[in-house]
Amino acid sequence: MKTTAAILTSVLLATTGVEAKPMKVFILAGQSNMEGHAKIETFDYIGDDPATAPLLKQMRGPDGKPAVADHTWISYLTGHYEGNANGEGNGKLTAGFGARGANPTQDGGKIGPEFTFGLAMDAALKEPVLLIKTAWGGRSLNTEFRPPSAGPYVFSETQIEQMKKQGKTRDYSKYSEWLADFIRDVRKDLKAPKMPFVIGVLGVDGLNAKGNTVAFRDAMAAPASMPEFKGNVAAVETAPFWAEELAVIDEKRAKVNQMAHLLKVKDKNSPNKDGSMDEAQQKEYLKKYEAELISPEEAAKWKRGASNAGYHYLGCAKTFALMGKAFAEANIAMMKGRNDP
């Protein structure tokens, strides 16, 4: 499972020039779910729920197109995969600053938490706002985001062998410690000892998550409860934003994909165990199988609300929009608590 720590920090800087105003700068850091994999085409789904319909209105301008912030800008430095050149997308905040393709300077047609986060800040603050987004998929606090205070990490031979066999480890015992180090180190580097941090706690699988997912969530949220971080570090649970109704459909889609594989490999438990079905017959069987599992209404709902896999929150704009809004609200609350203007 890919996991994401959506860490948002803020620091107050000053601009220069005639009639310069203070600028609020927010750093949005994380991996694939901070990149954001919700296609703009799923916006309409937000309006289907009366509880989130008002949020959709904020996300769109009078012309029905994605809103453009009045005094909020974004700089997004990223790259598609390791080995490809990084590039910067920048300009006034609007939709399209989510995950990007081979050319990271171009609009990717997606959003992450940055969109509604920035819109909320644009509405709440009078001064100019800059979002600095730094996000790459498949990065971890253990290695790429490892804080200097945690020291160098050297894998033992045993760990290397385990990772070769398992593909990943599930030891979260050090995560809370490293995340606390990360907060301290960033504050030290920027000379901002009380800089507010918002930790976006993993929400994949929603409120029904169990086992390792729950353990990881606890590890992520733990620093917010440390006495030294009282009032300036907040953990925002994103599980309530998980689109459960879409997840149910996704499970059915997974069964269809699994059946397609079983037919193809002539699995002994599939209808094609004797290899008598040609490609056309397999497609016809699969079509009927899918129709029995997924109703036309469910298929339409999926197309309207989802655009990616479960580990990317199903590519649901409703989920990412609620995340960004919640992160902004938590940050604003901490800023008020320290009497920021």
Image (tube, rainbow, N blue to C red):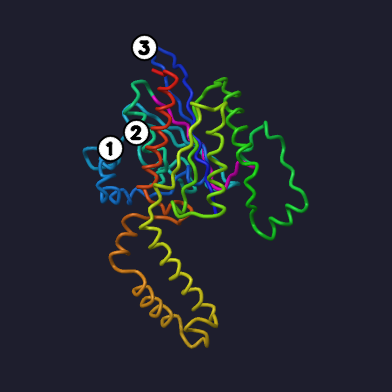
Residue for badge 3: 19
Can residue 191 be seen here? yes
Which residue range is magenta in the image? 129-142
Q: Is residue 248 left or right of residue 222?
A: left
* Marking on residue 58: 1
Rendered residue at 50%/40% (across/down): 6
Q: Is residue 27 above or below residue 43?
A: above
Q: Are marks 2 and 1 in contact (CB under 8 Å)?
A: yes
Q: Nearer the viewer, mark 2 or mark 3?
A: 2
Question: Is residue 137 one of those drawn in magenta?
Answer: yes
Nearer the N terminus, badge 2 or badge 3? 3
Residue 181 place in picture, x, y as percent? 62, 32
Q: Earlier in the sequence, mark 3 or mark 1?
A: 3
Graded by Cα atoms within 10 Å as few (under 14), some (14 to 19) or many (20 or more), the crowding at tag 2 reads many
Residue type marked 3: Glu
Pair 3/1: label in front: 1
- At label 1, which amino acid type do we have? Gln
Report the disc number at residue 123. Answer: none
Q: Residues within 10 Å of mark 1 (few under 14, many from 20)?
A: some
Where residue 86 sits, quadrant-wise, is top right
